[in-house]
Amino acid sequence: MKRLKNIIKWLVCLFFASTILAVVVYRFLPVYVTPLMLIRCVEDGSLTIHHHWVSMDEISPHMPVAVMASEDQRFLLHHGFDYSAIEKAARHDMKHKGGKKLGASTISQQTAKNVFLWPGRSWTRKGFEVYFTALIELLWSKQRIMEVYLNSIEMGEHIYGVDACARYHFNKSAAELSRSDCALIAATLPNPRVFDSAHPGPFMRKRQKAIAAQMRFMPSFPKEGEDINPHTAAGGVYRHHNR
């Protein structure tokens, strides 16, 4: 029994040491492959992965604004979890039992899931997601979280990251994406394997227009080291993105 307790203790220590180390390493190094990429390869029986890591300086400034408008409008304000959105989703799900569930995952949660975990809705995976979300919020800046998110998120069939999406769907680099392009890409994110930014239909165009309208009321995304608190920001960092 004592030996079993020691084994469990060492396994727990190994888990925390390895996961914290991985988060620290990815604070500085590019994320070239994620569990989802490998899972998709197995599911589709294909080794095709379109993925080009680029820094935030090589991504259109409209892109982070577009995904915030679409996915997480309080990204710069919360610490990983948007409790008001969670409460709203819970009320919606209770009212519409058996219907389509309302999502409340933040960009931080999606980044933690994409980089460290597997897709799914089990309580076990959700627990790990909470753990990794707390870690990256503690050890990474908001700019790093957004950079990893934009480079790792699925954006089409075998397409991961904004630069690969820009090149395969728009024939341009991530830096060259227009405000309208970014709104269209963001419109696919609920289900990028169903919604195609290369061939958008009427529903996609409607979502693109709605996201573009929301972008006018979003802040420009701050560079590394700039103040992101709207109450204390200096020099107009938290200005409306109405260009």
Image: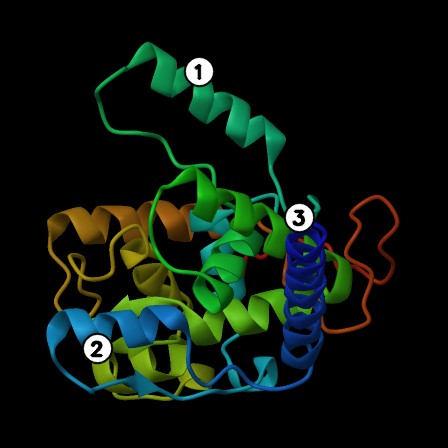
Would you name the residue on which mark 1 appears?
A: 91
Residue 62 in view of the camera:
no
* Residue at point 81%, 67% (across, down): 226
Number of other residues with Cα within 10 Å of mark 1, as a class: few under 14, some 14 to 19, many 20 or more: few
**Residue 189 on image: x %, y %:** 32, 56
Q: CA distance from mark 3 to mark 1?
A: 46 Å
Q: CA distance from mark 2 to mark 3?
A: 42 Å
Would you name the residue on which mark 3 appears?
A: 1
Out of 15 and 235, give the one closest to the viewer. Answer: 15
Q: CA distance from mark 2 to mark 1?
A: 37 Å
The image quarter containing residue 83 is top right
- Which amino acid does the dot numbered 3 rest on? Met
Would you name the residue on which mark 2 appears?
A: 41
Out of 108 and 210, give the one closest to the viewer. Answer: 108
Out of 29 and 129, give the one closest to the viewer. Answer: 129
* Residue at point 63%, 78% (across, down): 26
* Residue at point 42%, 47% (across, down): 213
